[in-house]
Amino acid sequence: MSLLDVQKYLGQSKSAKVSYNRKDLILYSIGIGCSELDFVYELSPKFSAFPTYPIVLGFKGTANDVLSFPSPMMMQTMSTPPLPGTKVGLDGERFLEILHPLPLEGTFTLKDTLIGVHKRGQGALVETETTISDDKHTYVRIVSGAFLVGAKDFTPESAGQTYSENIKLPARNADAVEELKTSPLQTHIYRLSGDYNPLHIDPRFAKMNGFKEPILHGLCSLGFATRAVLKTYGNNDPSLFKAVKVRFAKPVMPGETLAVSMWKEGNRVFLEVKAKERDLVVLNNAYVDLKEAPAKL
């Protein structure tokens, strides 16, 4: 039996147009629980995009209506190699970095590039790098790590780059803990930003995939966690945000409380997120980098 050579896929890129407007920014902000007027009211003097908004553009593309899943945008830019044995792909990790302040609206080019394929346990970690740009600036860089359950029979077992890392938390009690309550309808709102995976709303589909009920989008939890850091150490000022990195450890159930524990070390805030009701870690190996390090307000 011949093995799939993943080297030939590395560096392959696919591009497509993406767009958003102020309504999209507001809808996303509400979807991650924002109530601050600067993120949800277009006439606020400091109205801004929440920094993690671009993470949905790989689902949304230029669409203004509901989408199938996988969405046309996902199909157009998908750069995952056809690894033998793959049963399902799971969101494993995400890194997002703002390189230039986000405009309030516009049309941009999203470019996806396969950067790494690595054997991990009973599957493989596939990493892609995404940039969002126009003819003036590159605004965002995103590195996504997807775990392909069952992937096998490929060579070499580690090819290309990896941004996956085990992050050790400081050896002290958390400097701050912020508790954020999600709504039982959180997935209903968040999905309108572009991720229409039925796993997050259809009870029958969730049970078919081994869950008792629909689960919260991992990227929604990422947004909640980033909110906690920006509120605690950045006075909700998006211009202070530089980057966020998280690993998705366990699913969150809509309605649960996210307890975000934070440790501040210079401009980096390490974090760990638990579903409070189950005392279960749901996000780990995580941090937010700030451009400045203002004192806690």
Image: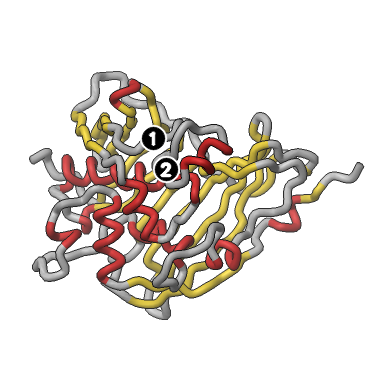
In the rendered image, the quadrant that contains the C terminus is top left
Residue under the image location 51 percent in, 50 percent down: 144
**Which residue lies under the disc numbered 1?**
252
Q: Where residue 160 sits: x, y (%)?
A: 65, 49
**Which residue lies under the disc numbered 2?**
218
SS at mark 2?
A: helix
Q: Amino acid at mark 1?
A: Val
In the rendered image, the quadrant that contains the N terminus is top right
**In this rendering, which labeled residue sits more in front, label 2 or label 1?**
1
Residue under the image location 17 percent in, 54 percent down: 237
| Front residue of this view, candidates 235 and 223 | 223
> First in sequence: mark 2 or mark 1?
2
Q: Where residue 294 sits: x, y (%)?
A: 14, 45
Q: Amino acid at mark 2?
A: Gly
Q: Are marks 2 and 1 in contact (CB under 8 Å)?
A: yes
Q: Where residue 172 sits: x, y (%)?
A: 26, 19
Q: Is residue 124 above or below residue 38?
A: above
| Front residue of this view, candidates 78 and 138 | 78
The circle on residue 34 is: none
